[in-house]
Amino acid sequence: MRTELVTSVERCKDGFIQNPDDWSPELARQLAGEWDGLEFTEELLDLLLFMREHYFEHHVTPDVREATQYLMSRGLDKKAAKKRLFELFPHGYMQQGCQLAGLRRPTAWCVG
């Protein structure tokens, strides 16, 4: 069941926030609660903040390669970083990551 904060934010039928400026870490925590088995951690929040910073700087969502490189900058080797990315987003980096980061649905990738 969604709480008031989540329902007060406009979302598309697929769950993506319509206005990225409506995002907050608290909202991301609530959105994470909609996904079975997803644990909202500081590590996850750190990655969501990276995704948002990248999006607003470059006007595009960081792809898997860029997200993996970000995790590598935090001390993981390439293989471990890619594995960790998919552990953080078990339902898919693009769909789950963009929803939790408050970014619009990517049009260049299949997220369904």
Image (cartoon, grey):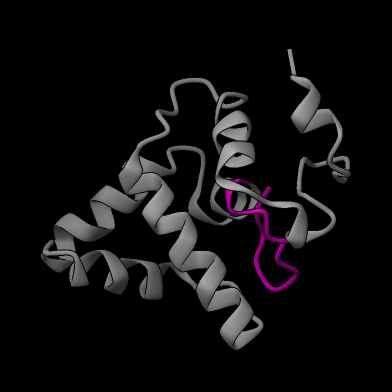
Q: Which residue appears at 48% of the width and 56% of the height? A: 48
Side of 29 relative to 105 (left or right): left
Majority secondary structure of magenta residues: loop
Residue 85 lies in the magenta-colored region? no
Indicate whether 2 appears above or below 83: above
Q: Which residue appears at 68% of the width and 51% of the height? A: 23
> Where does the image place residue 109, in percent across and percent down from the top left?
65, 67
Q: Quadrant of the N terminus?
A: top right
Side of 15 relative to 57 (left or right): right
> Which corner quadrant of the image does residue 102 belong to?
bottom right
Residue 105 lies in the magenta-colored region? yes
Q: Which residue appears at 44% of the width and 21% of the height? A: 37
> Where does the image place residue 63, in percent across and percent down from the top left?
49, 72
Q: Which residue appears at 11% of the width and 64% of the height? A: 75
Side of 108 relative to 43 (left or right): right
Residue range of the region highlighted in magenta in the rendering: 100-112
Indicate whether 89 appears above or below 55: above
Closer to the camera, 110 or 13? 13
